[in-house]
């Protein structure tokens, strides 16, 4: 008997991105090293951002996304945002939930530039390489 191809315009999933990434995926140890590096840099992030105003993209998410761009040779921020929008693996690595919105590429670039001016990106990559 031929199977149906149901229309899934609205779909609910009760499986977390964490559960969808296989246990032996090569990004798992990288994410652990990244998490440790980001924890060590937390105080430095606090000094870069104002205590009031509109919330920014968390620097932890920005740096994880930049690392994905490097690891997977994604050629532009626009393409990175597109890939982040539909890849469960990328969402898991960056720390986004399945329903979290992905940033506009220009917003991502503007926030990335803040980290580069604050020398945080250099410190982050040095911490990851040291791990």
Image (cartoon, rainbow, N blue to C red):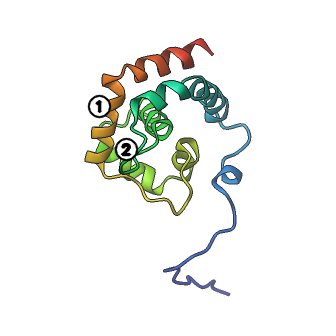
| Residue 76 in the image, given as x and y percentages of width and height | 29, 39
Tell me which residue sits at (45%, 36%) in the image: 59
Along the line of sight, the residue nearer the viewer: 120 or 7: 120
Q: Which residue is mark 1?
A: 113
Q: Is residue 72 above or below residue 83?
A: above
Residue 100, above or below 83: below
The quadrant of the picture occupied by the N terminus is bottom right
Number of residues whose C-alpha sits closer than 10 Å to that of mark 2, classed few (under 14), some (14–19) or many (20 or more): many
Left or right: residue 12 compared with residue 70: right
Residue beneath the point at 49% across and 22% down: 124
1 or 2: tag closer to the N-terminus: 2
* Relative image position of residue 123 (x, y in whole percent): 46, 17
Cα distance in 3D space between marks 1 and 2: 16 Å
Residue drawn at the location 44% of the way across and 50% of the way down = 84
Residue in the image at 43% along x and 55% along y: 85
Residue 72, labelled with which disc?
none
Tell me the SS state at disc 2. Answer: helix
Q: Secondary structure at mark 1?
A: helix
| In the image: residue 87, left or right of residue 103 | right
Which residue is outermost to the right? 23
Image quarter for residue 26? top right
The tag on residue 80 is 2
């Amino acid at each position: 008997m031929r199977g149906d191809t149901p229309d899934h315009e609205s779909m609910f999933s009760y499986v977390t991105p964490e559960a969808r990434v296989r246990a032996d995926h090569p990004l798992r140890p990288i994410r652990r090293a990244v998490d440790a590096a980001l924890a060590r840099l937390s105080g430095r992030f606090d000094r870069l951002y104002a205590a009031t105003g509109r919330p920014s993209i968390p620097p932890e998410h920005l740096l994880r996304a930049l690392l994905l761009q490097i690891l997977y040779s994604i050629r532009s921020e626009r393409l990175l945002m597109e890939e982040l929008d539909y890849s469960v693996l990328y969402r898991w690595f960056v720390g986004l939930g399945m329903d979290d919105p992905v940033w506009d590429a220009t917003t991502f670039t503007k926030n990335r530039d803040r980290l580069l001016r604050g020398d945080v990106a250099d410190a982050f990559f040095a911490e990851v390489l040291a791990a």
